[in-house]
Amino acid sequence: SLHDALPIVFVAHFAWSHRAVRGARFLAALMVAVAIWATMDGLETAAFELSSKIFFSKLSHIGVQATPVLLFLFVMRYAGRDGWMNPARLAWLWLLPLATLGMVFTNDWHGLIWPEVHLIDLPTGVDAV
């Protein structure tokens, strides 16, 4: 949510300011992805209109799709197990998240990610399902 994003951005800034440390660059990128995810999720929750909820949900997927890859890369670099990393292998790691992100942003044409989306009233507010 929105209040979670600020400390996450602080961690990203701290990691980036120590980018010479093993894994710090991937940690900073990971925290940026998580901050995007949290911020967009918070904005989606705060939105009342279906089109706004869908828009923020799509944007949240930038963080959602990047987080697992960046977490894996951070752990591998931090543990010193990154000798296998090269541009081709990194491209393979990003293939599925980028394809999914492409499907998210083109969902209006094919409906493969969200076949139907409706607003429902909950005790905590309006949500899209």
Image (cartoon, rainbow, N blue to C red):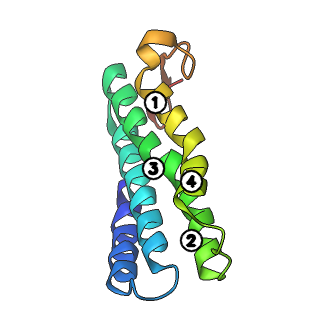
From the viewer's perspective, is the residue at label 3 or at label 1 nearer? Answer: 1
Residue topped by disc 4: 88
Q: Is there a contact, CB below 8 Å, between mark 4 and mark 3?
A: no
Distance in Å between CA atoms under marks 4 and 2: 18 Å
Q: Position of residue 123 (x, y in %)?
A: 50, 33
In the displayed structure, 94 sits above or below 123; it is below
Q: Position of residue 90 (x, y in %)?
A: 56, 56
Distance in Å between CA atoms under marks 2 and 3: 15 Å
Disc 4 residue crowd, few under 14, some 14–19, many 20+, Cα 10 Å: few
The amino acid on which the numbered mark 3 sits, given as a three-letter code, is Gly
The residue drawn where x is 34% and y is 29% is 55
The amino acid on which the numbered mark 2 sits, given as a three-letter code, is Phe
Which of the pair 91/55 is nearer the observer? 91
Residue topped by disc 2: 74
The amino acid on which the numbered mark 1 sits, given as a three-letter code, is Gly
Residue topped by disc 3: 63
